[in-house]
Amino acid sequence: MQKTDVAILGATGAVGQRFIQLLRDHPWFAVREVVGSSRSAGKSYGEAAHWILDGNPPEDIAQLTVKSLHDELTSPLVFSALPKEAAIDREEALAEAGHIVCTNASANRMVADVPLLLPEVNGDHLQLVDAQRRSRGWRSGALVANSNCTVMPVVMALKPLVKYAIRRLHLVSEQATSGAGYPGVSSLDILDNIVPFVPGDERKMETESRKMLGAFNGSSIDELGIVVSATCTRVPVVDGHLINISVELEEKPDLDAVIQDWISFRAPDPIPSLPSAPAHPLRYLEQIDRPQPRRDRDFGNGMVTSIGRLRECPVLGYKFAALSHNTIRGAAGCSILNAELLAVEGYIQGTRVAETATAT
Amino acid sequence: MQKTDVAILGATGAVGQRFIQLLRDHPWFAVREVVGSSRSAGKSYGEAAHWILDGNPPEDIAQLTVKSLHDELTSPLVFSALPKEAAIDREEALAEAGHIVCTNASANRMVADVPLLLPEVNGDHLQLVDAQRRSRGWRSGALVANSNCTVMPVVMALKPLVKYAIRRLHLVSEQATSGAGYPGVSSLDILDNIVPFVPGDERKMETESRKMLGAFNGSSIDELGIVVSATCTRVPVVDGHLINISVELEEKPDLDAVIQDWISFRAPDPIPSLPSAPAHPLRYLEQIDRPQPRRDRDFGNGMVTSIGRLRECPVLGYKFAALSHNTIRGAAGCSILNAELLAVEGYIQGTRVAETATAT
Amino acid sequence: MQKTDVAILGATGAVGQRFIQLLRDHPWFAVREVVGSSRSAGKSYGEAAHWILDGNPPEDIAQLTVKSLHDELTSPLVFSALPKEAAIDREEALAEAGHIVCTNASANRMVADVPLLLPEVNGDHLQLVDAQRRSRGWRSGALVANSNCTVMPVVMALKPLVKYAIRRLHLVSEQATSGAGYPGVSSLDILDNIVPFVPGDERKMETESRKMLGAFNGSSIDELGIVVSATCTRVPVVDGHLINISVELEEKPDLDAVIQDWISFRAPDPIPSLPSAPAHPLRYLEQIDRPQPRRDRDFGNGMVTSIGRLRECPVLGYKFAALSHNTIRGAAGCSILNAELLAVEGYIQGTRVAETATAT
Amino acid sequence: MQKTDVAILGATGAVGQRFIQLLRDHPWFAVREVVGSSRSAGKSYGEAAHWILDGNPPEDIAQLTVKSLHDELTSPLVFSALPKEAAIDREEALAEAGHIVCTNASANRMVADVPLLLPEVNGDHLQLVDAQRRSRGWRSGALVANSNCTVMPVVMALKPLVKYAIRRLHLVSEQATSGAGYPGVSSLDILDNIVPFVPGDERKMETESRKMLGAFNGSSIDELGIVVSATCTRVPVVDGHLINISVELEEKPDLDAVIQDWISFRAPDPIPSLPSAPAHPLRYLEQIDRPQPRRDRDFGNGMVTSIGRLRECPVLGYKFAALSHNTIRGAAGCSILNAELLAVEGYIQGTRVAETATAT
């Protein structure tokens, strides 16, 4: 089977490197084009990228020549790890030119006809792509976003609770520094310290969660009408965002029922058979002092959300902690899973993996 | 002027060392007796204590012989940094024997006739000592507690807001490891990690805050009838507890009015003239990313509570962050301030500092 | 094929947990007995062990009942993660009773007839077991030690340089806190700090290196006659010991020749075919700022030693940095590799894996 | 007494902020001009500087308008915290224009007629200023440098040992991240990690130490003819550079004699009476696990070098650890002490503090 060619925008940055790492042995996709800033363009990737993940970049990628942002691309599938401003400019143009653009950038997330996709939570929002193509006159291209890395564990943990009618949500995050990219957070700001503010993230948690948990009405998304209060803080942790969640539910399930909802949660077909999908997207930890970033972030190749400490909240009814790997499940890994769903649903032209996977 | 002799229980531990450090040049009190475990008793303090603060223990203290827990003490004033179990046993016996016992232990905090004292917040609770002496038949002794180190910044920040009628409180702490004593938190549990659970602290935040913000009714404390939900987490920070606070007020003051309440907050006389009292117990930081533990914990010799990020909370109305130095203002420093108030109010027998201070 | 039964001494501690983690899917060995302190004995492992590694202990191990140190064991192969004092007592008795004891404890390392085994470096020292059995009258038992975790990367990196005649060695380590076990190093000692002293390790580096690089003379080990100066420091890193090494060689190879020696270094047969052996035990990193603990410790499943920064030393001639994962290659992983070599060489009674492996 | 006006170049950076913090209540000097990049020029200092030290910048400084690098300055005394390239350009021009320039930049350190001044070590090198003025035709201006922050504790600790004839020196540093300025070291490079390379510092340790320990021969400096091997590493510590030092001495003093040399070390008059000079520049710690950055860096207001762990080195004879606060004694604090010596020796025009201080 021929793999689908992939281009990565913002390939030398922290999230770009995660894309390359996670796609190293991908069964369906193969990285053929890497796109960087004007400073990197023309160099080999190995030379241009200051590799900050474990080990070294894969040999074959290291030898690719970095393209510049406005070079034409040949890959049908494009992953974007661009900063917001560059993304505004470029992502739409690429989708218009016929590419499937799966983006981790925030620029287009709240645009009405762009799905803010987390397959296990709102895989059906993918249908928005048809509306998007109709309204914009695109034939083969599409623009699909994944959420902010801090919102991600929240909506994942809440998805099985939507049936109880969520009313109000109070969120306090303790976020890893990798969420700010590289070089990102200065060591002088975070060693032996906490920064009780993360630019932009509180607003994103309040808006993106409503869209992601919303319902596709046949042509657009009806946002979930919940009240959300978010506080975002930065802590001296490399990877893994921990969110302290308090939630008010109209129905009042037992704590045990909620835990059971999490444990038994499965994504609908064909999502569980996608290469990057964990068998169980949620895990509940019985230990009283878990989840913990360093010990739980890598579970399920960093694609599983870990939950713990469910107990009564005197103010809102229920409270618990949720944790996800922010640069895997909360960024590059989610974009890849989104692309896998697009592939299997036949949205990526010339990609035959769809049938194979569905057959499985 | 003769200084009052002081004994320190649990003198070799982390909080015991803070007592010694903070009393080094105290104008009224002088450490004359240090009490340790059976393992330490009989050794010189310098030999028995593994000093974990900056520099070395003061020379004169290093040469004191460590007494054992049941040795008789001659000092009228006793500071206790005992673990809970030892405290239950010993603190009451010492108060009964005529000592003024200012304790940082949790054992007696919620006992009805024991003031849980934070002078700027509830200095008038000191009158409970008279009830305590009457009911227990004590003449010169007394037992006065200070609060848990995580509760402390919360009640300090809320004190000026009591007038708006506090209804509900939602607290998420990010606590330094020194709060667990020494050796306390293992480095393997906290490097590049968060532990989302601190044994006992959530309950303490929910109970102690109601007592501390309560009113003295002439013979006992009427607790403040507020609903409190607390989540306590441990982060890789040496000193300084940061609390993310959301609060519901019956009255709805402007944000500016609340900031003004904090800035203009002063303790009633004679508290501001006590040697360890900061001129302004509260500080509001205008920067959007403050307070921060490493940069703000030492302000005002570690005795000032720093507040920042006041903004609207979609769920409870108001939210902000508060920070205090947990082993200074939240532990030893608070006990010392409590003792200074006891001295100036004439509760410590044979201590003449009272008049001097009042005269000032 | 039947797997060999394995017992783990000190199974609830930090290194004991690594044994369990690394043996989870071992092709030859299966953990059947776990031995703990009197406090743990009688409980299930899941209950007794405060699991500090990623995730949870394997289900089947969690259900084993913890035995006490003096219970009889039925497993022919015993891994020891005991503290030194308990090891002195127990390891020799078990070997005498017929068990193969592969120990990570320091108690017996410098005993003359105990091989201090690092297969790629001194696999031939295994022959000392025959001398050991003869002199002690043991038939099926044996006692084999692995080195201190800080010595390990040093001898591994030096092995290919022995041919140049090593004269003097100057070592400064920057060690991870996991080297001290759990709870081990207090967070208050190491956050935002360095402790420039690690009890016992400097002496071990100076003695164990000479034994490990020594030659088996047919009946005992002739130590390598080198002068060694070691300084050991502890830094705020979870796993991975970095050693700054300066070395004087009698011959004066080019820097490139030395790098080539490292890159081309292979262990003699049958070592490369052992399940836990990395294909290439050494890796040289060209980047000027490597090796780094967090980014390089896990290379080759934590079994490869990474080297970097080879350059001239104005004092001793050559200097470079070497790094190994201290609780994998430097502890449990090395013991397991030692046991694999014992198995393949026919030292473990009733173990048929030897033939299989040799056949491969 | 009128204070001398001071300008600070690079005032908004990390070292610039230290200058402002340390000069807050200086008895002789008052900051009147702050100079920043073109991005900061024209703004108030409070607005332009992202203050990274404890608390806030002093009120009066916060209100100064930031000047740009090529604006004319009126202050006779100029402290420079410029990056190297800007320093090359500007420092010499300011000295030529009549200013006394005390610089922390590396640009001019190894220029033959520029004193590389650490008063307690080589206060007599100040006489080089006369040669400098003669050869360059300057009348009131001068250019005086202080050393690299990692070299500083080395030469301070070695100064009392020069009499034993130092031959060879082997240095391995563990450096705090503040040494790289702000934002400097990314948190992603240093959390749970070590970077075994600090650009430029190894060469500086090998060259600057020879100049600083050299002798003024009446017109220039004869460098000390020692062999130096330096390895520089970066660790997750905020402030305080720890250096592991091995040294070969031609004479062979007892260890006790060396400790006595350190304890009894004093700077010659008038240095001990300068406002920023510690009474004892060196401190020897008897505890086996000291000095430690977090616990010892602030001793003597960050101006004292702490030494510990003196013992025999099998390779070079003597080894020990030395620690200094890198942004106080190793940077801004040293520049200020240099300026105080210049003032008291009459080099700063219109400064009358000289007589006062000498009189004391």
Image (cartoon, coloured by chain):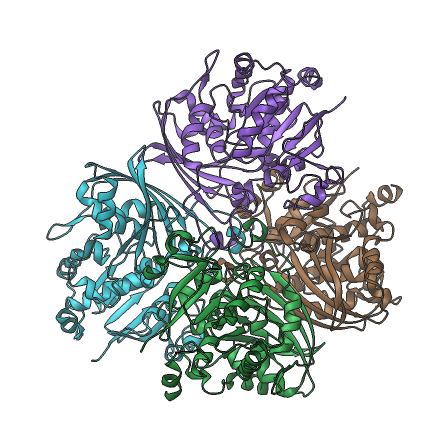
Chain colours: A purple, B cyan, C brown, D green
**In this picture, residue A272 sits left or right of residue C5:** left
x, y percent for residue A139: 61, 14
Q: Is residue A111 above or below residue D107?
A: above
**Image point (37%, 79%), residue name:** B64
Residue A223, by quadrant, is: top left
Residue D163, by quadrant, is: bottom right
Q: What is the number of callouts on the image?
A: 0
**Image point (56%, 54%), residue name:** D185
Nearest the eye: D301 or B48? D301
x, y percent for residue C358: 87, 45
**In this picture, residue B205 sits left or right of residue A47:** left
Q: Is residue A305 visible?
A: no
In the picture, which quadrant includes the N terminus of chain A? top right
Nearest the eye: C314 or D314? C314
Nearest the eye: D336 or D71? D71
x, y percent for residue A10: 61, 36
Which residue occupies the extreme left position in the image? B218
Q: Is residue C58 above or below residue D29?
A: above
Nearest the eye: B40 or A153? A153
Q: Is residue A354 visible?
A: yes
In the picture, which quadrant includes the C terminus of chain A? top right
x, y percent for residue D258: 59, 85
